[in-house]
Amino acid sequence: MGIESTGCTEEQQSGPGIRATIIPEGDHPIRPADLDREALKVLYRLRDAGFSGYLVGGGVRDLYLGKQPKDFDISTNARPGQLRRLFRNSRTIGRRFRLVQVFFRGNKIIEVSTLRSQSEYGRQDTRVLPANNTFGTLEEDAFRRDLTINSLFYEIDTRTIIDYVGGVDDLNNGIVRIVGDPDVRITRDPVRILRALRHAARTGFVIDHNSYRAITSHRDKLNLCPASRIRDEIIKDLVSGYSRAWADLCIQSRVFFTLFPFYDQAGENGLDELGAILSVIDRLQGKNGATPVRLPDYMLMALLLYPWLQRELDLLQRELKGGGYRLLFNDIRQALDESICGRLNIKRSGKEAMTMLFVNMPNFHRYQEKKSWPNWLRKKSYFNDCARFSAIINEARGGDPVSTDLFAGPPRPDTVRPVNRQGGGGRGGRGGNPSFSDKKGGVFGLRAGRFSGC
Ligand code: ATP
Ligand code: MG
C-alpha cells in the first residue's frame, strides 16, 4: 500500500547552503573511548583510505545522553562499491538504498551507509533507484532524517559534533522535534509518528508543539503504511523497556486508537489494566537493573491484547468443559482475525501461538490463584508458555511479582504448538515449531534471535 504524496520531495525540505553548527570536543560529552571498538575500527579505516566517516543517528543521541547505544551506525561519503573493497568481511544489503554490513568476530555487525539526499522511507515506487540519484551531502543527509536529535554527526578526527538541524539544542532542552515541516515529513512517511512517540517515551523528552499537532492530525495516515512495518515498530516498543510510557503517549495522542481501534471500547479500566501489564513487561526487559528476559513476540502481542480480549470474551469466566474449550478457541481466533491479524499482517503461526495463550487462561488463572499446578497441566507442552503469560497478568492484577526464574532455561520447542494440528501441525512446511523458527522472518516476520527466545 502506498503512502500519500504531497509532491514535495525530501530534498526540498533542507534548503541549500544551511550552515552547520560545529560543537568542539570541550563542549560535548562524547569521547572516542565511548564508541564501540569495531565502530572505531571502521571509522579509522575510512579515514585512512581518504574518506570521511561519521557516527550518526541513535549512536550520537544516546552517547550524548550518557546511555549505551543499541547499535553504532556509520555514514560516509564512500560509495557501496568502495566500501566493499575496503572491508573484505562485508556484504551489501537493501534494494533501494544499499547499505554495507561489516562483520566482526562474535557476530558483531557495523552498518555503514553512504550519505543520502533522500530517505528510503516514503517513496512509493519499488524500483531500485539509480545510484547517483540517491547519494547526498552531509547537509542533505541531516535533513532526510526523522528527528533533530537523530540527525547529528560525530566526526572522529576532529572529535566534533556536526549539527545542521538544532539537534544539540533539542538534546539539551529535552525536546523531540521532527526535522523540517512536520506535516510534510509525516505525510511522506507516517511511521515518523511512531518514531517521535518512541523517542519521547524513551528519553522522557517533550514533543515540540508543532510536531505534536502534526502527529495528532495525521495519525490516521498510519493506516496507509505496510502492515508489517507497523507491526515491527510496535514490537520494538514493546521490548524497549519503555512500553508503558510509549502506550501512555500513544493513548494521549490517540495514535493508539488508530493502531488498535478496538481498544476504543475498552474503557478506562481496560487501559489501566494494559498500563499495568506493560509495566511488568518493562521490568522484565531489564528496566530498573533487573536481568532482561526475552519475551517472544507473540507473547508480547498477546499481552498487549489481553485487557481488550478479556472484556470482549469474558475469558476468565469461561467454562471449558464439554464443548467449551473448542467454542472459546473459535471465539478467540475469530476475535484475533477481526481485530489484529489482518491489520498487522500476523502470520497463522503467530495467531495460533496467541490463541494457545488465551484459550488456556481460564485454567491457568484458576491454578495461579491457588499457587499450585496440577500434574496433568505441568505435562502439557504449552505449560511453560502459558504459566509465564499467566504470571505476568497475575502481577499486573496486583498478584506476586513474576520471578525471572520462570523464564530460565532454553526455549521449549513445543510450547506454542498449535492445538489444531491436523495434517502434521502447521502449514507451509514450517512444522509445529513456528515461534522458534531460525528462519529469517520468525512468527511476526522479525529476524529470529532478536525476538524469538523466551
Ligand atoms: P535505536 O536504534 O536506538 O532504536 P535509532 O534512532 O538509531 O534508535 P534506527 O532505526 O537504528 O533508530 O535508525 C537509525 C537512524 O536512521 C535514525 O536515528 C534516523 O536518523 C534515521 N531514520 C530511521 N527511520 C527513519 C525514518 N522513517 N525517516 C527518516 N529517518 C529515519
Ligand atoms: Mg540505531
Image (spheres, rainbow, N blue to C red):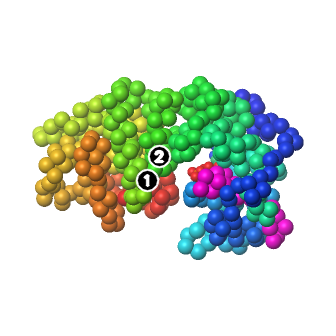
In-image side of 31 versus 22 (left or right)? left
Instruction: Determine which quarter of the picture holds residue 316.
Output: top left
Residue 399, relative to residue 408: is it above or below?
above
- Would residue 414 be seen by someone viewing this image from the given angle? no
Residue 137: percent from left, percent from top: 82, 50
The residue under label 1 is 287
The magenta stretch spans residue 125? no
Ligand 1 near label 2 (Cβ, under 8 Å)?
Answer: no
Q: Are marks 2 and 1 in contact (CB under 8 Å)?
A: yes
Mark 2 vs 1, N-terminal side: 2
Q: Amino acid at mark 1?
A: Lys
Q: Nearer the viewer, residue 312 or 269?
A: 269
Extent of the magenta region: 47-66
Residue 252: percent from left, percent from top: 49, 30
Going 15% across and 37% down the picture, which residue do you hit? 319
Label number found at residue 242: 2
